[in-house]
Image (spheres, rainbow, N blue to C red):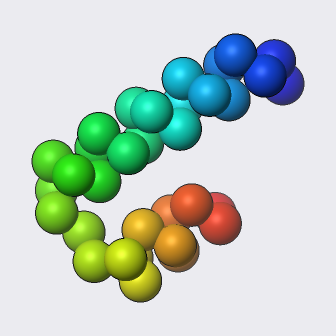
């Protein structure tokens, strides 16, 4: 996958996590999925 796409996905994911206020444990589960 393109580096830029990965960076953008990371930003979007971070925004979604903040939106849903997931705990760090849940974020790690999604991040490693």
Residue at x 28% of width, y 44% of height: 16
Quadrant of residue 33 within the rendered picture: bottom right
Number of marks: 0
Instruction: Classify 22 as above or below 17.
Output: below
Which residue is located at x 41 percent, y 83 percent?
A: 25
Left or right: 31 in relation to 19: right
Q: In the rendered view, tell whether residue 15 sits above or below residue 29.
A: above
Kindly indicate the quadrant of the structure image that contains residue 12.
Answer: top left
User: Quadrant location of residue 23?
Assistant: bottom left
The image position of residue 2, as x and y in percent, is 81, 18
Q: Is residue 27 left or right of residue 4?
A: left
Q: Is residue 16 above or below residue 21?
A: above
- From the viewer's side, name the closer residue of 11 and 32: 11
Residue sticking out furthest to the right: 1
Q: At which x and y percent is residue 7?
A: 62, 28
Q: At x 24% / y 69%, what residue is drawn?
A: 22
Q: Position of residue 9 (x, y in %)?
A: 54, 30
The image quadrant where one finds the N terminus is top right
Residue 6 is left or right of residue 14, and the answer is right
Compared to residue 27, the image places residue 26 above or below, namely below
């Amino acid at each position: 996958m393109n580096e830029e796409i990965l960076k953008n996905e990371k930003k979007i994911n971070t925004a979604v996590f903040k939106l849903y206020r997931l705990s760090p444990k849940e974020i790690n589960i999604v991040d490693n999925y």
